[in-house]
Amino acid sequence: MAKRDFYETLGVAKTATEAELKSAFRKAAMLCHPDRHPGDHQAEARFKELNEAYQALSDTTKRAAYDRYGHAAFEQNGAGMGDGFASSMADIFDDLFGDMMGRRGGGRSASGKERGADLRYNLEITLEEAYNGKNATIKLPTSVTCETCTGTGAKAGSKPHVCKTCAGHGRVRAQQGFFAIERTCPTCQGRGQTIDNPCDRCAGSGRVTRERTLSVNVPAGVEDGTRIRLTGEGEAGQRGGSTGDLYIFLSIKPHPFFQRDGADLYCRVPISMVQAALGGEFSVRAVDGGDAKVRVPEGAQSGRQLRIRGKGMPALRSRDFGDLYIQVNVETPQNLTRRQRELLAEFDAESSQKTHPESAGFFSKMKEFFEGLGGQ
């Protein structure tokens, strides 16, 4: 049976780069890896076919020969890829399947130490606290180094021993036909050490759970979703491993008056029809606690924004401040008295297109538009 084209086997074009070749091989090989299909001869054959194609095309010299002569370039070598096939497979597995076989997960070292996990803490603050900054005190349960065994996991007077199964490597290698496959050592779970007499307090883990109190400095100007990293304040490592980190994720409570966009603040303020028509001035309480004067120009319309410079939020780690935008909302009078109705009626009688240019212009344009349609 004729061999399939190597490029077709990997599902790539002949112009594929080394990175594209490796990515295609990784995806295809993961699907038919012998460990995932024990006893499936078709999967094993497919995996060997993928490996043969990748071995040829990932080598610059072999790829050039294959591009010129096809499969005939390797027929004189008998097995196709030469005598280094089995040894090269170990390197390929280490590169592509390290995560699956436990080589890279867990942060374990050859001495059996394991880095502690990173922790997350959600901290909610007010907008005023985000403006001024805050020194917050938090409490969280976490794993700390066991004081009884000082993190070794072994009872006092004893110590961990090198694992006899893996000789301290944390991995064992098994031969499956052509393939030499490494797996996490089942005896020591990849730590490389075993403990004959575990510590009574921590049961051999080298750490215990305890509630800790920490002080967190929240700088002025933080935004919703800001992350603060406290190095070394996460979980203690197992058996003397390094401590993880603590990540503080900030969220800001919704404010009853202000909406935030970066360093700028927005606030909607209702004003009377008379104040909008005649203009005027009013004060609003800013987020810094002081009063800000707002000047309303004569004839202000609903939705108009008035800017007050420097009354917004501080920019994080900067001396700059955002602005405060006041959006005026003209309020229509309600529950009028008889005299108020009479005054408004008199005002309406004295009104003209000059006093209501927008509404007059709108109806005039609408009339012209529909009259034009009728003429057509």
Image: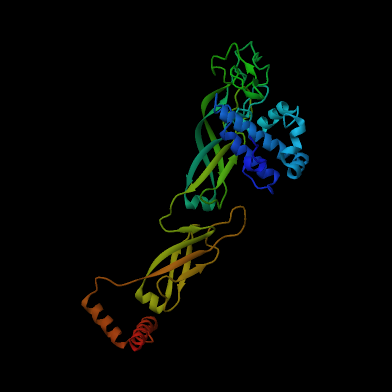
Question: Can you give x and y, in whole percent of width and height, for residue 195 in the image?
Answer: 61, 14
Question: Can you give x and y, in whole percent of width and height, for residue 5 in the image?
Answer: 66, 41
Image quadrant assignment for residue 164:
top right
- Residue at horizontal 75%, vertical 42%? 69
Question: Can you give x and y, in whole percent of width and height, for residue 11 in the image?
Answer: 61, 43
Query: As rendered, which of 274 and 120 lies closer to the eye?
Result: 120
Q: Which image quarter is the C terminus in?
A: bottom left
- Residue at horizontal 56%, vertical 34%? 31
- Residue at horizontal 52%, vertical 42%? 136
Say if 330 sits above or below 172 in the image.
Answer: below
Image quadrant assignment for residue 86:
top right
The answer to whether any part of residue 79 appears in the image is yes
Spot the residue most to the front.
1
Question: Can you give x and y, in whole percent of width and height, for residue 142 in the image?
Answer: 52, 29
307 horizontally vs 80: left or right: left
- Residue at horizontal 46%, vertical 66%? 326
Query: As rendered, which of 85 and 188 lies closer to the eye?
Result: 85
Spot the residue most to the left.
338
